[in-house]
Amino acid sequence: MTRIDILTLFPNMMNMFFEESIIKRAQKKGLAEVVFHDLHDYSLTRYGSVDDYPYGGSAGMVMAVEPVANCIEKLQQERQYDEVIYTAPDGEMFSQPIANELSLRQNLMVLCGHYKGVDERIREHFVTQEISIGDYVLTGGELAAAVICDAVIRLIPGVIGDEQSALSDSFQDGLVAPPEYTRPPEFRGWKVPEVLLSGNHAKIEQWRYEQAVARTRERRPGLLRDEE
């Protein structure tokens, strides 16, 4: 079973996402476990403060070192973590290969960034991997953590009924997915490509590969640069 501990300032913000669809089924099957930890509970102040003004006088607030360190160290006393992930705009861009690798881990910790970020000492002494889901800034790292968890959990064997489906997703082979069709074979004069109705699996696979390459070249040409 894969366990993911999420350290956040707003645990209630994430509950609904993890109580629906595939993520919920994965937890009910005992294939994954997602646990939220409210950083306010680890504050050293009577008011549960978790942030403070940055040294140097710049604008905004910074997540304080004490509550984050207290939470991380408490969890590390309970189990060994394969990765302590921090969601940050300047982290490594999240990708399918990263999701594949993380899905093989047993214990993951995800620290949701907030405000102007976390005290740098947390990144220096506790964080083992920093991940960004795009070149933009969110109000908090909870959405990024949810994206990471969703991409990872769906890859765990047994979570998706048809495991072959996950293996044929976009980016698994460095290409975006080819077009997909279902019944009826004709709708308003719009026809499904004949090759998909032929029953010739070799030709169908060749068509799908050619379509994937063409679509990748058109929409995400950067994915082909290494191959070309």
Image: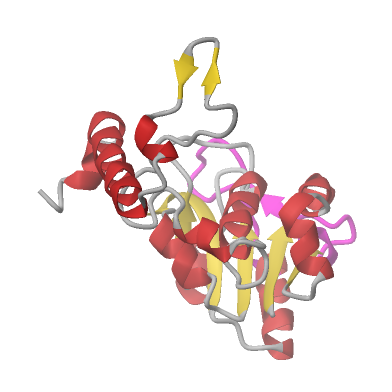
In screen coordinates, is 225 left or right of 34? left
In-front residue for pair 219/95: 219
**For the image shown, how many numbered marks are present on the structure?**
0
Residue 104 left/right relative to 36: left
Q: Quadrant of the N terminus?
A: bottom right
In terms of depth relative to the viewer, which is nearer, 112 or 108? 108
Query: Magenta region: which residues?
Result: 39-66
Q: On screen, 181 above or below 97?
A: above
- Taking the spot 30% from the left edge, 30% from the top edge, the residue there is 219
| Magenta region includes residue 41 | yes
Whether residue 150 is visible, yes or no, is: yes
The image quarter in which residue 2 lies: bottom right
Q: Give the residue furthest to the top.
A: 188
Location of residue 226 with respect to 46 vertically, above or below: above
Q: Nearer the viewer, residue 217 or 76?
A: 217
By what rule are the colours in the image chosen?
Answer: secondary structure
Residue 43 appears in the rendering: no
- The residue positioned 59% from the left and 38% from the top of the image is 60
Magenta span dominant secondary structure: loop
Q: Splitting the image into 4 quarters, where does residue 115 fall?
A: top right
Where is residue 56 shown, x and y percent of the image? Answer: 48, 46
Above or below residue 124? Residue 94 is: above
- Measured as percent of width and height from the top left, residue 198 is found at 39, 41
Name the spot of residue 173 as percent of width and height, x first: 33, 57
Residue 224 falls within the magenta-colored stretch: no
Name the residue rendered at 42%, 35% in the picture: 179
Tell me residue 109's x, y (percent): 63, 71
The front one of 209 and 135 is 209
Which of the 4 image quarters holds residue 68? Answer: bottom right
